[in-house]
């Protein structure tokens, strides 16, 4: 594996509802998430299109195939729930959300070994953020 594990996963983007305050998608309020990729959830929140419900949620911003080459098409503009969800063990902590999403897509959970230097001493470690 030569890339960050999230770049071959995308399970969280195709498992959870991504709901957040509407101001995150309004430029006049300082928001940067594209409003065109959201839908109204209630008077105070919007959700990323494709994640609101149904048996097979998939965020409209997710590109690629889950478990193979998935990535966020708006990574720099992603909403707060996406920024806050951490991959399991990336920073030495478990992530039940990451584990649940990966399991739902038949992917093995990430482990502390996922983040160890695969080349041995002297090589740079894996990046610490997606």
Image: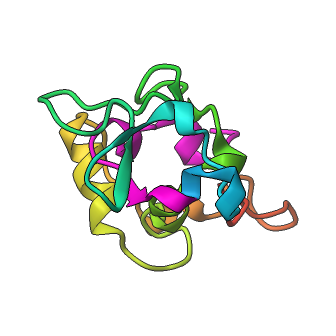
**Residue 110 appears in view:** no
Tell me the quarter of the image containing the N terminus: top right
In the rendered image of this protein, does residue 8 appear above or below residue 124? Answer: above
Left or right, 4 with respect to 80, comes to right
- Return the x and y of residue 56 as percentages of the image width and height: 20, 27
93 shown above or below 15: below
Drawn side of residue 44 relative to residue 26, left or right: left
Which of the colour schemes (rainbow, by chain, secondary structure, one colour) is used?
Answer: rainbow
Q: Is residue 4 magenta?
A: yes
Residue 62 vertical placement versus 2 (above, below)? above
Q: Position of residue 45 (x, y in %)?
A: 35, 57
Please state which of residues 83 and 31 is positioned toward the viewer in this rendering: 31
Q: Which residue is at a point 25% across and 39% down the rendered structure image?
A: 52
Observer-nearest residue: 111 or 79?
A: 79
| Quarter-of-image position of residue 100 | bottom left
The residue depicted at 54 percent of the width and 68 percent of the height is 90
Image location (x, y in percent) of residue 28:
70, 56
Report x, y in % for residue 87.
47, 61
Q: Which residues are magenta?
A: 1-23
Residue occupying the point 41% across, 30% down: 67
């Amino acid at each position: 594996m030569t890339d960050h594990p999230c770049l071959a996963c995308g399970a969280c983007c195709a498992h959870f509802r991504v709901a957040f305050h509407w101001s995150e998608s309004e430029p006049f309020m300082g928001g940067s998430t594209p409003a065109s990729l959201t839908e109204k959830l209630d008077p105070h929140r919007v959700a990323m299109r494709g994640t609101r419900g149904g048996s097979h949620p998939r965020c409209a911003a997710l590109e690629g195939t889950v478990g193979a080459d998935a990535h966020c098409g708006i990574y720099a503009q992603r909403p707060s729930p996406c920024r806050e969800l951490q991959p399991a063990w990336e920073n030495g902590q478990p992530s039940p959300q990451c584990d649940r999403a990966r399991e739902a897509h038949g992917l093995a959970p990430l482990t502390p070994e996922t983040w160890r230097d695969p080349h041995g001493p002297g090589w740079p470690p894996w990046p610490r953020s997606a």
